[in-house]
Image (cartoon, rainbow, N blue to C red):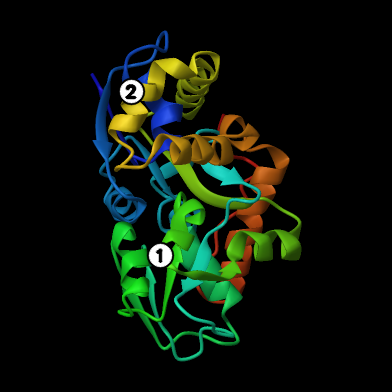
Amino acid sequence: MALSLAVSPCPNDTFVFHALIHGLVPGAPGIDLTFADVDVTNTAAERGQFDLVKVSYAALPWLLDSYDLLPCGGALGRGCGPLVLTRGQRADLTGATVAVPGDRTTAYLLMRLWSAGHPPARIEVVPFHQIMPGVAAGRYDAGLVIHEARFTYQRYGLTALADLGEWWEADTGLPIPLGAILAKKGAVDPAEATGWIRGSLRHGWLDPAASQEFILANAQEMEPAVVKQHIELYVNEFTLDLGEDGLAAADALLGRAAAAGLTPAVPAFAGAKG
């Protein structure tokens, strides 16, 4: 029986999961694939909709009763944080209307922590591809963007008010935990799923040309040079194994969020499966 898998169509996910999706990982089950933005998967996972699912670390407090965090396959690293963009010069977000890609995304949680002393006046959840054009057109005072937008925002005439990854790393010394892979309890053995995903990732690293057609077909009109930058930034040693630094980063993010009253408290991740 096929396992249901939900990931984004972004190049890092299609690179990591290409071999698993296409039956190239020995011993792995068939995959019933769904592509969806992370704001959609955060909500779907709360309903228990998928066996394996990519979600925001910020959404974990609402999901860990039903899912196990896997130590691989996600998006976590250095120099890859969300950006707060504006059309003109601003000192902070006081009184601003800000477009964000989801209200349970790691990006939004980081922005709330960063802007605690100068919060925006209004938040609008906007499909990711509409954020930069909306800020450029003046529909929003600022926009919160992720992934490939850090390579392209200048084309819209926008300015980076803050790099939340730089802020996080300077404040904590830790990598930034963006996207996590979860396995549904009772449906997927976490250790087996970890093996399948690591096998898929290693296949991608050994034969990167094999996944290129699949990646480009789902890259939402992203040009090949940006696709390459995207994969190089977001597929890294933490994708293979969160390790002590990765788990510490997740603990720090959600510990700070709980202390600020932004999310429910969760146990430390030192016992993550796999």
Three-letter amino acid code at disc 1?
A: Tyr
Q: Nearer the viewer, mark 2 or mark 1?
A: 1
- Label 2: which residue? 213
Instruction: Identify the secondary structure beneath mark 1.
Output: helix
Camera-side residue of 92 and 20:
92
Q: With respect to residue 8, does 115 lie above or below?
A: below
Query: Percent x, y for residue 118?
Result: 56, 87
Q: Determine whether 59 is above or below 92 in the image.
A: above
| Closer-to-camera residue (154/239) | 154
The answer to the question of whether label 2 and label 1 lie on touching residues, with beta carbons closer than 8 A, is: no
Q: State the residue at coordinates (42%, 8%).
A: 26
**Numbered disc 2: secondary structure:** helix
Answer with the quarter of the image where residue 163 lies. Answer: bottom right
Q: Single out the residue that lies furthest toward the top.
A: 26
**Would you call the spot at circle 1 few (<14 residues within 10 Å), some (14-19), or many (20 or more)?**
some
- Residue that label 1 marks: 156
Where the N terminus falls, by quadrant? top left
Asked if residue 189 can be seen in this view, the reply is no
Tell me what residue is drawn at x 53 percent, y 39 percent: 229
Q: Can residue 244 be seen in this view?
A: yes
- Whichever of labels 2 and 1 marks the residue nearer the N terminus, that label is 1
